[in-house]
Amino acid sequence: MRKKVAEITDEDFYSLKAGVIWRYFKGESFAFWMICAYLFFEYVRPQSIFPMIDFLPWTKLVVIGAILGCFADRTVRWVSSSINVLLILFLILILLSSVFAYFPSVSYAKLDSYYLWVIIYFLIINIVNTRKRFFIFLCIFLVASFKISFSLAITWAKRGFAFTDWGLMGPPGFFQNSGELAIQMLVFWPIAWAFAHSVKPYVSKNWYWLLMLMPITAIMVILGASSRGGQLALVVQLVVMNYRTVFKPKVLISCGVAFFLLWTFLPEAQKERFQSMGEDKTSQQRILYFENGIEMIKDNPLLGVGYFNFPSYFARYYPDDVLLGRAELPHNIFIQIGTDVGLLGLAVFSGFLLVSYRIGRRFKVEGCEDRQALIGRCANLSLLGFVVAGQFVTVAYYPFLWIHLALAVAMNNSFTVSRKKNQGRS
């Protein structure tokens, strides 16, 4: 006999019973459908894969649908978090920085690069407000990322794990370039690893090993993407992940073998790129961005030179330091934020990282096995990967951090709501 939606348990979800999960999803609200559709269109990007359906702004339409759906969804309640305050404060600083920018028109043209994330963040945390909703939403995030990692891992294997100048490229959008693609995989694999271990007691061995393909293929993509920053961030993640046991003989040997295999799989051309770090023209240009970026912040400490004004300011005031034909963004998230919104903005941005870290570290799942709290701890590994790799690319306004913040708050809130309901029943 089919279970009614009200009778579907968490264990049914953890067992990955697709039919049961689908029936539950069909009975959910329009707002939840729309926010899930947003994640699907943003990460899978079927409109780019199949041009025949690319005749409407799908992501914008589903976001509008989610906003309208909130008014009909009685379960949607305002979710409080210190991150909410920081997001609004950061938006105010961006607006002020744009008004007082050296090139205001450049700033105004880029305002949607941030305020859209504010809208999406608030939609996620207020709609994804139960354990089951969070589970489904997280599964969409994992499957969408796995679709990218699996196909690109196969592509790299077909090349014979050979190096190319462009590395591996993701679907058109935020993850197309190899550096940004590597960061998405750095964010994805720790959560995928935690998810596989969390549901392991509820699924078959075949299901478990299928789930483990998610972190495995993600790591393969990081290696094949040819992004030095991404590969360095992966090493840091692995070290931090095993820091408590790293000095045990078995772990030392295992880590040594793992790093040897990682180095072996790296193409020779990629190894040469590591050996030439700091000497090649790209590295020299990024060092100049870093050094002059610090000077920009010192000269404009309150609100920076202006939101997204770095390239224009650099080209005007440091023309002799433009080595690659034109000035670009600074290839460092902290220099980007510091020049965009000054030390005030850097303080708020650091607040995002600190609060998110604390949520992950303190996350507990009462009434469940401790292994299910792994996702909170591994979310901090994802955050670490973003921060380390972000020292080499300009991704402050890409989805990595903003979706991560939304997932962290939604995770904490959805389990807190369930805990309060259970306490009320008892």
Image (cartoon, rainbow, N blue to C red):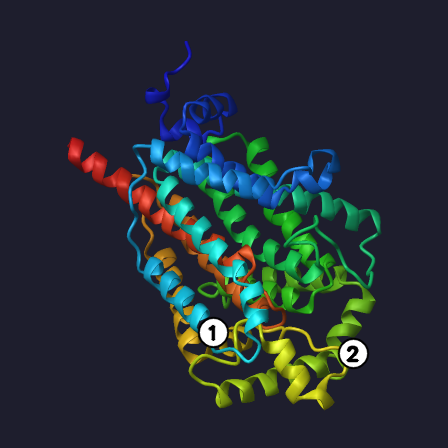
- Residue assigned mark 2: 325
Name the disc covering residue 99, or none: 1
- Which residue is located at x 66 percent, y 85 percent? 316
Q: Residues within 10 Å of mark 2 (few under 14, many from 20)?
A: few
Q: Nearer the viewer, residue 231 or 180?
A: 180
Q: Identify which amino acid the numbered label 2 is placed on.
A: Gly
Distance between the Cα atoms at labels 2 and 1? 29 Å
- Which residue is located at x 50 percent, y 68 percent? 247
Image coordinates for residue 92, horizontal then vertical, percent: 39, 67
Q: Nearer the viewer, residue 55 or 36?
A: 55
Q: Secondary structure at mark 2?
A: loop
Which quadrant of the figure contains the N terminus? top left
Is any atom of residue 332 visible in this view?
yes
Image coordinates for residue 207, horizontal then vertical, percent: 56, 32
- Which residue is located at x 61 percent, y 36 percent? 210
Q: Earlier in the sequence, mark 2 or mark 1?
A: 1
Image coordinates for residue 353, horizontal then vertical, percent: 42, 65
Q: Is the residue 193 above or below the residue 303 in the image?
A: above
Which quadrant of the figure contains the C terminus? top left
Image quadrant in which you'd find residue 76: top left
Q: Secondary structure at mark 1?
A: helix
Q: Identify which amino acid the numbered label 1 is placed on.
A: Val
- Which residue is located at x 70 percent, y 78 percent? 327
